[in-house]
Image: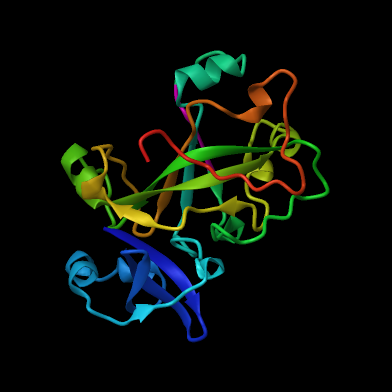
Amino acid sequence: MKLATVRTDNGLRTVRVEDGGYVDLGPGDLGGFLAHADWQSRAADAQGPRLSLDRSQLAPVIPQPGKIVCVGLNYRTHITEMGRDLPEFPTLFAKYPEALIGPNDPLTLPEESDAVDWEAELVVVVGQRVRRADRAAAEAAIAGYTILNDVTLRDWQFRTREWLQGKTWEATTPSAPTWSLRTSWPRTPRSAAPSTTRSCRSPTSATCSSTPPTWSATSRRSSPSTPGT
């Protein structure tokens, strides 16, 4: 089962994607929908009206997550192709909700940078609050998975040792059009707070690792994918 958030004349709606169409699950975005304890049965059993939508009406899957925690330097091959030493721990950084856009929204590359890069990322969506969870509790807290396109201004990212300033420019992070339930994906537990999204860095293909680097052009649209999606 796949869910999405769409824009309508009456505001944001949560929908179930079915047979190429959209079944209305009610007002509000998917992040709010997850607050219902019975959200899974609501999503599966809903017989709401089918909405006729243009692709431009697809919003970020969760437009206002409580937090966006990103994981970097967690793939050995990606680290070595970047010419870095293997770290003792992965790097964590954040994005702000204002960075998110829908899958078909325009992405205007900032004129302040000549080194715009992109990477396809697996996103883990946490559906309930957990703290100091064991493996089973952490896995149970995962609501589902999606992907996003992590657009990065590499020159700004590497101005300092902190990555934030190159990672969270407004309207530069497209999300996938839909979100899939945990039960339809491999078992990969993560943990955080409700409506948290966690972005796991791509294993390869960052354009800055090529020689010479190949940066995104101003008119280019990138469609990310991750292995197995």
Q: What is the quadrant of residue 190 in the picture?
A: top left
Residue 27 seen in render: no
Judged left or right of residue 153, residue 177 is: left
Quadrant in which the C terminus is drawn: top left
Is 115 included in the stretch rendered in magenta? no
As drawn, the residue found furthest toward the bottom would be 10
Q: Position of residue 90 (x, y in %)?
A: 46, 28
Judged left or right of residue 15, residue 41 is: left
Question: Which is the main secondary structure of the residues drawn in magenta?
Answer: strand
Say if 12 sits above or below 173 in the image.
Answer: below
Q: Position of residue 183 (x, y in %)?
A: 21, 48
Residue 18 seen in render: yes
The one of 52 and 24 positioned closer to us in this rendering: 52
Say if 28 sits above or below 223 in the image.
Answer: below
Quadrant in which the N terminus is drawn: bottom left
Residue stretch in magenta: 89-93
Say if 201 sits above or below 69 in the image.
Answer: above
The one of 108 and 140 positioned closer to us in this rendering: 108
Q: What is the quadrant of residue 195 in the picture?
A: bottom left
